[in-house]
Amino acid sequence: MRRLLVLAAATPLLLSGTASAATPSSPHRAPAPDRAFMLAVADDNQDLLTGRYAVLQCDPPGGTHRKGTKSCEALEKARGNPAAIARDRNRSCTTEYKPVKAFAVGTWDGENIIFEHTYGNFCAMLAATGPLFDF
C-alpha cells in the first residue's frame, strides 16, 4: 500500500514534466485542458511498481501509450472516468482466473482522478476498459 501511495504522490510530478514537454507554450493560445494519466498494469502477485507503465497525454494525444488516440477518445466519452468506459460486449474472454491489477492516476479538466481495480484476467480488463490499459 505504501508503494501505491508513493506512486500516486509522484504522478503529478511525472505528468507535469510530460505535459510541459508535449505542449508548446504560445502567448496566443489558451492552455489546453489538463488531461493526463499515469497508467500501470501488474499481475495480482506483482507490486504495481514492478508492473508495466504508460503515460497518456490527451489534447493532443501523446505520452508513451501506444494507443493514445483511442484511449483519449474512450476517456472523452467517459468524461475522464476510467470506470465509466463503455464495456466491449464483442470481446469474448475465457474464465481463466489469472488476476491483473489496473491503476490510473491523473487529471481530467482539472479534476484529480484515481482508479484502481483488479480483474479476473487480462482479457476481462481489456473488455472493461477498452484501449486504456492496452499498452
Image (cartoon, helix red, strand yellow):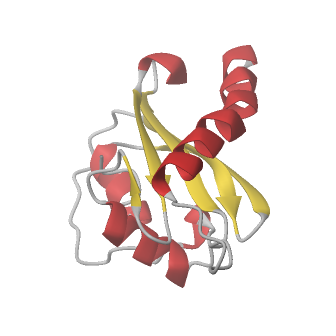
Q: For the point 31% across and 44% down, which residue is it?
A: 122
Q: In the figure, 128 relative to 99: above or below? A: below
The quarter of the image holding the N terminus is: top right
Q: For the point 41% across and 24% down, which residue is it?
A: 51
Can residue 27 be seen here? The reply is yes
Q: Quadrant of residue 53?
A: top left
Q: In the figure, 39 relative to 77: above or below? A: above
Can residue 47 be seen here? The reply is no
Residue 40 horizontal/vertical position (percent): 48, 36
Q: For the point 20% across and 65% down, which residue is it?
A: 92
Q: Nearer the viewer, residue 115 or 9?
A: 9
Q: For the point 70% across and 40% down, which residue is it?
A: 12
Residue 2 horizontal/vertical position (percent): 75, 16
Q: Nearer the viewer, residue 128 or 81?
A: 81
How many marks the image carries: the answer is 0
Q: Nearer the viewer, residue 15 or 132?
A: 15
Q: Residue furthest front?
A: 27
Residue 64 horizontal/vertical position (percent): 35, 44
Horizontal side of residue 47 vs 134, given as left or right: right
Residue 132 horizontal/vertical position (percent): 41, 58
